[in-house]
Image (cartoon, grey):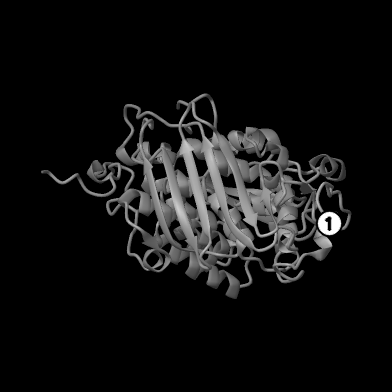
């Protein structure tokens, strides 16, 4: 495996402009927020809320989940994110363990099993280590209570569907689908999960990051007024890639290099930038009705996806969201969200709200949060909330909300690939399915994995 500049999407997040926001203020009764002067000090009391308190979801984010029923988890997808989520789960509560592992490849399963033994003294016996494209069924059927689904994104709708059929609570890493067929599977399965009273949390960890939660509350209280638009960014260096090794089959190589193939990852606008798009759809409560975008491939060394995207989304009420993402070394980097309102703006890069004159009227106090809380990692806090919901018998279902942001990213991607305007109605009804028809772990038809070219050639004179 090679890495560009030794950077991964997770380590980049922690070193980006958002790093100062990772340790953030909680949603408990003790407030450690800073309200800054410079504007109208009574601005918050004079504002009209966008939503009334109690009408929107705010998670409780203690350091550790409350004690309760013992929970046995199965991990489906034992790579970097699956391994990370496994330890997030174990660090989120007492009385939880992992009893089954599944992955396409034996070495991934064994690596995580070794790590669990070394760091947590958890033994995963050989008969609970499952390998292959159908390993997810064996994990789910092995007697677990909950499943952590962290396979390449194309597989997540199918795995979520089977877990829900079997009555298992699911943690779904984002993105949760890569195409319209997967989107519809997610939406239908989410309804089934609700009907069964299951708890479904997704890996959009900003929903469990205290700085974002407190910012969301301030926006809902009306501090920036009515939302009029926004810009969201995920611009960073190139992610990791794997060059093909001798003896690897077509499918084995692509899955091991999954983040660079559009059928597996959905391209980075879906796989990664969905985080930022999700912040705007979450804060605004709106979905896009159409998208016009463009992108290109200039530097990527493997796979068949783009290096950059720029998309103009028109939302339901006519306001616009500009989406920008890029994975190229040596360029200006930015991972943040900016939302403009009639009375001010919010910027996640600084976790500040400013009035229209540019005065800071509210700022999130990360240092105070560090004093008040021991656990500041949002990747762990999402598991704290998940476990609390399960133990408290308080069903939660985040898949539908995440699917909206996911579909927005799909709309932007397809517009960039084709050069055409895409619409919500057409895309959600589309038969587009990225799963290869000849999917197997051996030889595949590689002729279909080509870089998209938008529009048409220039007319010859």
The residue located at (42%, 45%) in the rendering is 267
78 sits to left or right of 262? right
Q: Which quarter of the figure is the C terminus placed in?
A: top left
Quadrant in the rendering for residue 446: top left
Q: Is residue 131 visible?
A: no
234 sits to left or right of 201? left
User: Is 421 drawn above or below residue 237 in the view shown?
Assistant: below
Quadrant in the rendering for residue 433: bottom left
User: Toward the viewer: 297 or 121?
Assistant: 297
Farthest residue, direction right = 30
User: Is 217 drawn above or below residue 393 in the view shown?
Assistant: above
The residue located at (40%, 57%) in the rendering is 179
Q: Residue 198 location in percent, x, y?
A: 62, 67
Q: Residue 356 location in percent, x, y?
A: 70, 52
User: Toward the viewer: 318 or 208?
Assistant: 318
Q: Is residue 298 visible?
A: yes
Farthest residue, direction left = 461
Q: Which quarter of the figure is the N terminus placed in?
A: top left
Farthest residue, direction front = 357
Look at mark 1 in the image and give the residue it sits on.
Answer: 28
257 sits to left or right of 41? left
Farthest residue, direction bottom = 195
User: Toward the viewer: 184 or 158?
Assistant: 184
Q: Residue 444 location in percent, x, y?
A: 26, 44
The residue located at (76%, 45%) in the rendering is 24
The residue located at (70%, 38%) in the rendering is 121
Residue density around tag 1, few if under 14, some if 14–19, many if 20 or more, within 10 Å: few
What count of labels does the image hold? 1
Q: Residue 378 location in percent, x, y?
A: 69, 46
Assign a secondary structure to mark 1.
loop
User: Toward the viewer: 68 or 461?
Assistant: 461
């Amino acid at each position: 495996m090679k890495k560009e500049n030794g950077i991964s999407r997770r380590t980049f997040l922690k070193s980006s402009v958002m790093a100062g926001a990772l340790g953030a203020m909680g949603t408990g009764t003790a407030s450690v927020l800073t309200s800054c002067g410079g504007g109208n000090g009574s601005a918050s009391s004079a504002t009209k809320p966008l939503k009334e308190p109690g009408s929107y979801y705010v998670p409780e984010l203690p350091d550790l989940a409350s004690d309760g029923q013992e929970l046995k988890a199965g991990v489906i997808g034992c790579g970097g994110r699956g391994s990370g989520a496994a330890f997030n789960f174990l660090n989120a509560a007492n009385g939880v363990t992992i009893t089954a592992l599944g992955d396409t490849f034996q070495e991934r399963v064994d690596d995580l099993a070794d790590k669990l033994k070394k760091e947590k003294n958890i033994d995963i016996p050989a008969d609970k280590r499952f390998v292959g494209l159908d390993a997810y069924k064996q994990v789910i059927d092995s007697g677990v209570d909950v499943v952590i689904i962290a396979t390449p994104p194309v597989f997540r709708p199918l795995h979520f569907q089977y877990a829900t059929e079997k009555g298992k609570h699911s943690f779904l890493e984002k993105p949760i689908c890569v195409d319209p067929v997967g989107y519809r599977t997610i939406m239908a399965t989410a309804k089934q999960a609700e009907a069964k009273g299951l708890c479904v949390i997704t890996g959009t960890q900003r929903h469990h990051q205290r700085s974002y939660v407190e910012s969301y509350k301030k926006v809902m209280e009306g501090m920036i007024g009515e939302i009029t638009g926004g810009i969201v960014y995920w611009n960073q260096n190139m992610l990791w890639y794997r060059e093909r090794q001798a003896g690897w089959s077509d499918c084995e190589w692509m899955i091991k290099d999954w983040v660079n193939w559009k059928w597996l990852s959905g391209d980075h606008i879906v796989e990664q930038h969905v985080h930022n798009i999700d912040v705007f759809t979450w804060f605004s409560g709106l979905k896009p009705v159409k998208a016009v975008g463009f992108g290109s491939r200039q530097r990527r060394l493997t796979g068949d996806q783009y290096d950059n995207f720029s998309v103009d989304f028109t939302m339901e009420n006519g306001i616009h969201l500009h989406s920008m993402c890029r994975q190229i070394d040596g360029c200006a980097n930015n991972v943040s969200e900016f939302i403009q309102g009639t009375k001010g703006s919010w910027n996640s890069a600084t976790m500040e709200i400013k009035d229209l004159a540019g005065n800071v009227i509210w700022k999130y106090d990360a240092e105070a949060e560090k004093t008040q809380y021991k656990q500041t990692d949002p990747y762990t806090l999402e598991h704290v909330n998940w476990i609390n919901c399960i133990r408290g018998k308080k069903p939660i279902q985040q898949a539908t909300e995440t699917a909206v942001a996911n579909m927005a990213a799909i709309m932007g991607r397809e517009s960039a690939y084709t050069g055409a305007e895409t619409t919500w109605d057409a895309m959600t009804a589309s038969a587009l399915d990225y799963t290869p028809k000849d999917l197997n772990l051996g030889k595949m038809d590689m002729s279909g994995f080509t870089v998209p070219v938008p529009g048409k050639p220039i007319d010859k004179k």
